[in-house]
Amino acid sequence: MTVYFLSDLHLCDERPRINALFVAFLTGPARQAQAVYILGDLLEYWVGDDTLTRDPPGFVAALRALTTLGIPTFLMHGNRDFLLGAQFADATGCPLMDDPTVISLFGTPTLLMHGDTLCTDDTAYQNMRAQVRDPKWQQQVLAQTWEQRIALAKRYRSESQKQTRDKPEYITDVNQQAVEAAMRTAGVTRLIHGHTHRPAVHEFMLDGQPAQRFVLPDWYQNGGVLEWDERGYRMLTL
Protein backbone atom coordinates (compact mmCIF):
# COMPACT_ATOMS: atom_id res chain seq x y z
CA MET A 1 0.00 0.00 0.00
CA THR A 2 1.07 3.55 -0.73
CA VAL A 3 1.24 6.61 1.50
CA TYR A 4 1.09 10.05 -0.12
CA PHE A 5 2.45 13.34 1.21
CA LEU A 6 1.62 16.70 -0.33
CA SER A 7 1.77 20.35 0.64
CA ASP A 8 1.42 23.91 -0.61
CA LEU A 9 -1.38 23.38 -3.09
CA HIS A 10 -2.59 26.95 -2.51
CA LEU A 11 -5.94 26.12 -4.09
CA CYS A 12 -7.99 29.14 -5.20
CA ASP A 13 -10.39 30.22 -7.92
CA GLU A 14 -7.57 31.89 -9.86
CA ARG A 15 -5.97 28.51 -10.66
CA PRO A 16 -8.83 26.24 -11.80
CA ARG A 17 -6.43 23.82 -13.55
CA ILE A 18 -4.68 23.08 -10.25
CA ASN A 19 -8.01 22.65 -8.48
CA ALA A 20 -9.03 20.12 -11.14
CA LEU A 21 -5.66 18.36 -10.84
CA PHE A 22 -6.19 17.94 -7.10
CA VAL A 23 -9.67 16.49 -7.63
CA ALA A 24 -8.19 14.10 -10.24
CA PHE A 25 -5.63 12.98 -7.64
CA LEU A 26 -8.34 12.44 -5.01
CA THR A 27 -10.54 10.45 -7.40
CA GLY A 28 -7.59 8.54 -8.89
CA PRO A 29 -4.31 7.53 -7.18
CA ALA A 30 -5.43 8.54 -3.69
CA ARG A 31 -8.19 5.92 -3.74
CA GLN A 32 -5.57 3.17 -3.68
CA ALA A 33 -3.64 4.74 -0.78
CA GLN A 34 -3.04 3.49 2.71
CA ALA A 35 -3.12 7.13 3.89
CA VAL A 36 -2.84 10.69 2.58
CA TYR A 37 -1.12 13.51 4.50
CA ILE A 38 -1.63 17.15 3.45
CA LEU A 39 1.05 19.14 5.28
CA GLY A 40 -0.32 22.66 5.17
CA ASP A 41 -1.40 25.36 2.73
CA LEU A 42 -4.06 23.29 1.07
CA LEU A 43 -5.66 26.67 0.32
CA GLU A 44 -4.28 30.02 -0.78
CA TYR A 45 -6.30 31.52 2.06
CA TRP A 46 -9.19 30.56 4.33
CA VAL A 47 -11.31 33.10 6.17
CA GLY A 48 -13.35 30.77 8.36
CA ASP A 49 -15.39 27.61 8.16
CA ASP A 50 -18.56 29.55 7.30
CA THR A 51 -17.04 29.59 3.79
CA LEU A 52 -18.46 26.09 3.51
CA THR A 53 -21.99 27.48 3.45
CA ARG A 54 -21.30 30.74 1.60
CA ASP A 55 -18.76 29.76 -1.08
CA PRO A 56 -17.80 26.09 -0.65
CA PRO A 57 -14.69 24.94 -2.56
CA GLY A 58 -15.41 22.31 -5.18
CA PHE A 59 -12.84 19.84 -3.86
CA VAL A 60 -14.60 19.42 -0.49
CA ALA A 61 -16.93 16.78 -1.96
CA ALA A 62 -13.95 14.89 -3.43
CA LEU A 63 -12.20 14.85 -0.05
CA ARG A 64 -15.39 13.63 1.62
CA ALA A 65 -15.80 10.89 -0.98
CA LEU A 66 -12.22 9.75 -0.40
CA THR A 67 -12.54 9.55 3.38
CA THR A 68 -15.96 7.89 3.06
CA LEU A 69 -14.17 5.10 1.19
CA GLY A 70 -12.06 4.58 4.31
CA ILE A 71 -8.85 6.25 3.11
CA PRO A 72 -7.40 8.08 6.14
CA THR A 73 -6.64 11.63 5.02
CA PHE A 74 -4.99 14.03 7.44
CA LEU A 75 -4.65 17.79 7.23
CA MET A 76 -2.12 20.11 8.85
CA HIS A 77 -2.44 23.88 9.10
CA GLY A 78 -0.14 25.98 6.93
CA ASN A 79 0.69 29.65 7.00
CA ARG A 80 -2.19 30.52 4.65
CA ASP A 81 -5.02 28.31 5.92
CA PHE A 82 -4.50 28.52 9.68
CA LEU A 83 -8.22 29.33 10.20
CA LEU A 84 -9.33 25.88 9.07
CA GLY A 85 -11.38 24.47 11.89
CA ALA A 86 -13.52 21.64 13.18
CA GLN A 87 -16.36 22.31 10.74
CA PHE A 88 -14.02 21.85 7.77
CA ALA A 89 -12.63 18.67 9.34
CA ASP A 90 -16.16 17.32 9.81
CA ALA A 91 -17.24 18.27 6.28
CA THR A 92 -14.27 16.51 4.66
CA GLY A 93 -13.60 13.74 7.14
CA CYS A 94 -9.99 14.94 7.39
CA PRO A 95 -8.73 15.22 10.98
CA LEU A 96 -6.54 18.24 11.73
CA MET A 97 -3.03 17.18 12.75
CA ASP A 98 -0.73 18.89 15.20
CA ASP A 99 2.38 20.54 13.78
CA PRO A 100 4.72 18.75 14.44
CA THR A 101 3.51 15.14 14.39
CA VAL A 102 5.50 11.90 14.39
CA ILE A 103 4.15 8.89 12.50
CA SER A 104 5.52 5.41 11.84
CA LEU A 105 6.20 5.21 8.11
CA PHE A 106 6.70 1.53 7.28
CA GLY A 107 8.38 1.04 10.64
CA THR A 108 10.52 4.21 10.69
CA PRO A 109 9.55 7.12 12.97
CA THR A 110 9.03 10.12 10.68
CA LEU A 111 8.50 13.75 11.67
CA LEU A 112 5.85 15.67 9.73
CA MET A 113 5.77 19.49 9.75
CA HIS A 114 4.49 22.29 7.58
CA GLY A 115 8.00 23.70 7.78
CA ASP A 116 7.51 27.39 8.48
CA THR A 117 8.68 27.12 12.10
CA LEU A 118 12.04 25.92 10.77
CA CYS A 119 12.64 29.26 8.98
CA THR A 120 14.05 30.83 12.12
CA ASP A 121 16.27 33.34 10.27
CA ASP A 122 13.11 35.11 9.06
CA THR A 123 12.32 36.88 12.31
CA ALA A 124 9.70 39.16 10.74
CA TYR A 125 7.77 36.14 9.53
CA GLN A 126 8.04 34.37 12.89
CA ASN A 127 6.64 37.45 14.65
CA MET A 128 3.75 37.56 12.19
CA ARG A 129 3.14 33.84 12.62
CA ALA A 130 2.92 34.23 16.39
CA GLN A 131 0.26 36.91 15.90
CA VAL A 132 -1.98 35.03 13.48
CA ARG A 133 -1.81 31.82 15.54
CA ASP A 134 -2.91 33.67 18.68
CA PRO A 135 -6.46 32.48 19.55
CA LYS A 136 -7.52 36.00 20.59
CA TRP A 137 -6.36 37.45 17.26
CA GLN A 138 -8.22 34.70 15.40
CA GLN A 139 -11.40 35.38 17.36
CA GLN A 140 -11.19 39.07 16.46
CA VAL A 141 -10.78 38.22 12.78
CA LEU A 142 -13.63 35.71 12.77
CA ALA A 143 -15.89 38.30 14.41
CA GLN A 144 -15.58 40.50 11.29
CA THR A 145 -17.94 40.22 8.35
CA TRP A 146 -17.15 37.65 5.69
CA GLU A 147 -16.38 40.43 3.20
CA GLN A 148 -13.97 42.10 5.64
CA ARG A 149 -12.18 38.81 6.19
CA ILE A 150 -11.83 38.23 2.45
CA ALA A 151 -10.29 41.69 2.03
CA LEU A 152 -7.93 41.06 4.96
CA ALA A 153 -6.83 37.70 3.55
CA LYS A 154 -6.11 39.16 0.13
CA ARG A 155 -4.12 42.02 1.65
CA TYR A 156 -2.16 39.57 3.80
CA ARG A 157 -1.47 37.39 0.76
CA SER A 158 -0.21 40.35 -1.27
CA GLU A 159 2.05 41.57 1.53
CA SER A 160 3.40 38.06 2.12
CA GLN A 161 4.25 37.61 -1.56
CA LYS A 162 6.04 40.97 -1.70
CA GLN A 163 8.06 40.28 1.45
CA THR A 164 9.11 36.88 0.13
CA ARG A 165 10.30 38.41 -3.14
CA ASP A 166 12.29 41.09 -1.33
CA LYS A 167 14.11 38.80 1.10
CA PRO A 168 17.37 36.94 0.39
CA GLU A 169 16.81 33.28 -0.41
CA TYR A 170 18.57 32.00 2.70
CA ILE A 171 16.23 34.01 4.94
CA THR A 172 13.13 32.26 3.63
CA ASP A 173 14.66 28.77 3.70
CA VAL A 174 14.92 26.53 6.76
CA ASN A 175 17.71 26.92 9.28
CA GLN A 176 19.73 23.69 9.51
CA GLN A 177 20.22 24.06 13.26
CA ALA A 178 16.45 24.41 13.68
CA VAL A 179 15.95 21.30 11.54
CA GLU A 180 18.36 19.27 13.65
CA ALA A 181 16.86 20.55 16.90
CA ALA A 182 13.34 19.59 15.80
CA MET A 183 14.46 16.12 14.72
CA ARG A 184 16.46 15.62 17.88
CA THR A 185 13.49 16.62 20.06
CA ALA A 186 11.24 14.23 18.14
CA GLY A 187 13.81 11.43 18.28
CA VAL A 188 13.81 10.84 14.51
CA THR A 189 16.24 10.74 11.61
CA ARG A 190 13.62 11.48 8.93
CA LEU A 191 11.66 14.70 8.38
CA ILE A 192 9.03 15.53 5.73
CA HIS A 193 7.82 19.11 5.30
CA GLY A 194 6.66 21.73 2.82
CA HIS A 195 6.41 25.53 2.96
CA THR A 196 9.68 26.51 1.27
CA HIS A 197 8.62 25.47 -2.27
CA ARG A 198 12.11 24.00 -2.81
CA PRO A 199 11.51 20.29 -3.41
CA ALA A 200 14.54 18.17 -2.63
CA VAL A 201 15.90 15.31 -0.56
CA HIS A 202 18.62 16.45 1.84
CA GLU A 203 20.92 13.87 3.39
CA PHE A 204 23.13 14.72 6.38
CA MET A 205 24.49 13.34 9.63
CA LEU A 206 22.56 13.89 12.85
CA ASP A 207 24.40 12.98 16.04
CA GLY A 208 26.46 10.42 14.14
CA GLN A 209 23.49 8.86 12.31
CA PRO A 210 22.44 9.28 8.64
CA ALA A 211 19.40 11.55 8.42
CA GLN A 212 17.07 12.71 5.65
CA ARG A 213 14.89 15.77 5.10
CA PHE A 214 12.26 15.62 2.36
CA VAL A 215 10.91 18.93 1.04
CA LEU A 216 7.58 18.67 -0.77
CA PRO A 217 6.84 20.57 -4.02
CA ASP A 218 4.26 23.29 -4.36
CA TRP A 219 1.36 23.11 -6.81
CA TYR A 220 1.65 26.53 -8.46
CA GLN A 221 2.55 25.17 -11.91
CA ASN A 222 2.06 21.40 -11.57
CA GLY A 223 0.98 18.97 -8.91
CA GLY A 224 3.58 17.06 -6.97
CA VAL A 225 3.52 14.35 -4.31
CA LEU A 226 5.90 12.23 -2.30
CA GLU A 227 4.83 8.63 -2.77
CA TRP A 228 6.03 6.00 -0.30
CA ASP A 229 5.51 2.26 -0.13
CA GLU A 230 7.33 -0.83 1.12
CA ARG A 231 9.96 -0.45 -1.64
CA GLY A 232 10.84 3.16 -0.81
CA TYR A 233 9.95 6.65 -2.01
CA ARG A 234 9.39 8.52 -5.26
CA MET A 235 8.87 12.22 -5.93
CA LEU A 236 6.15 12.40 -8.58
CA THR A 237 4.92 15.24 -10.77
CA LEU A 238 1.22 15.01 -11.62
Image: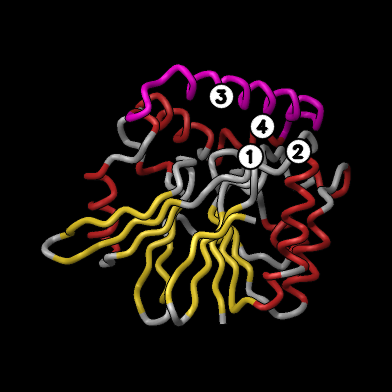
Establish if 221 lies above or below 21.
Answer: above
Three-letter amino acid code of the residue under disc 4: Val
**Mark 3 against mark 1, which lies toward the viewer?**
1
Measuring from the top left, give residue 148's x and y in whole percent.
76, 25
Q: Main secondary structure of the magenta part?
A: helix
Q: Please, what secondary structure does the residue beneath circle 4 have? A: helix
How far separated are the C-alphas under marks 1 and 2?
8 Å
Judged by depth in the image, the label closer to the viewer, 4 or 2, is 2
Q: Which residue is mark 1?
A: 220
From the viewer's perspective, is the residue at label 1 or at label 4 nearer?
A: 1
The numbered mark, 3 or 1, whose residue comes first in the sequence reads 3
As shown in the figure, which amino acid type bears the numbered disc 2?
Arg
Mark 1 vs 2: CB contact within 8 A: yes
Q: Look at mark 4 in the image and give the residue it sits on.
A: 141
Quickly name the residue at label 3.
Answer: 161
Circle 2 Cα neighbour tier, 10 Å, few/some/many (<14 / 14–19 / ≥20): few
**According to the image, label 2 marks what residue?**
15
What separation in Å lies between label 3 and label 1 (alpha carbons)?
Answer: 13 Å
